Image: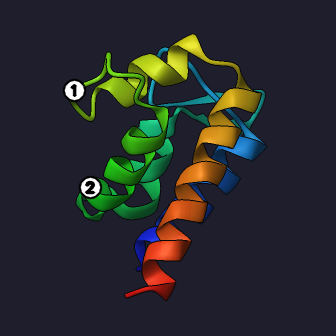
């Protein structure tokens, strides 16, 4: 699976049910995912490049590790999380087109 496709599918999971404080939860019969939980659900260990793209667009200098994505997810609104994914998808799409 291409990195951009991983990001797109993870974004869809979050759009359908977003979580904070945990990677995944079922609430009211619906699945809810945090950013890392969604990426891991879509691609497991193969999601590292997608995590790197997301970290690059959300990083304000305070995050030095992939775990910073969880902190960002929990400190952000769902709208901000989806916007971060949109930027990462855009960057990954450009990378894919340009080689």
Q: Mark 1 points at which residue?
A: 64
Residue 11 visible somewhere in the drawing: yes
Q: In this picture, is 93 found above or below 75?
A: below
Residue 81: x and y, percent?
63, 33
Residue 5 visible somewhere in the drawing: no
Residue 22: x and y, percent?
46, 21
Q: In this picture, is 67 found above or below 36?
A: above
The structure residue drawn at horizontal position 78% and vertical position 27%, both measured from the top left corner, is 28
The structure residue drawn at horizontal position 50% and vertical position 37%, both measured from the top left corner, is 35
Q: Which of marks 1 and 2 is nearer the N terminus?
A: 2
Residue 82: x and y, percent?
69, 40
Q: Marks 1 and 2, Cα distance to the nearest angstrom?
A: 14 Å
Determine which quarter of the picture holds residue 98.
Answer: bottom left
* Quadrant the C terminus occupies: bottom left
Q: Which colour scheme is used?
A: rainbow
* Quadrant the N terminus occupies: bottom left
Q: Mark 2 points at which residue?
A: 48
Q: Say if mark 1 contacts mark 2, CB within 8 Å.
A: no
- Is label 1 in a helix, a strand or a loop? loop
Image-based side of 59 in relation to 88, left or right: left
Q: Which mark is residue 30?
A: none
Crowding around mark 2 (Cα neighbors within 10 Å: few <14, some 14 to 19, many 20+) is some
Determine which quarter of the picture holds residue 2.
Answer: bottom left
Image-based side of 82 in relation to 54, left or right: right
The structure residue drawn at horizontal position 27% and vertical position 65%, both measured from the top left corner, is 46
- Is label 2 in a helix, a strand or a loop? helix
The structure residue drawn at horizontal position 38% and vertical position 57%, both measured from the top left corner, is 50
Residue 66: x and y, percent?
27, 35
Image-based side of 19 in relation to 16, left or right: left
Crowding around mark 1 (Cα neighbors within 10 Å: few <14, some 14 to 19, many 20+) is few
Q: In this picture, is 53 found above or below 37?
A: below
Of the pair 44 and 69, the residue shown nearer to us? 69
């Amino acid at each position: 699976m291409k990195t951009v496709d991983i990001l797109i599918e993870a974004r869809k999971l979050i759009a359908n049910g977003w979580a904070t404080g945990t990677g995944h939860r079922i609430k009211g019969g619906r699945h809810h995912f945090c950013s890392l939980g969604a990426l891991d659900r879509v691609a497991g260990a193969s999601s590292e490049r997608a995590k790197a793209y997301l970290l690059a667009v959300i990083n304000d200098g305070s995050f030095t590790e992939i775990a910073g994505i969880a902190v960002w997810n929990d400190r952000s609104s769902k709208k901000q999380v989806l916007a971060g994914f949109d930027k990462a998808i855009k960057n990954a799409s450009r990378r894919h087109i340009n080689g």
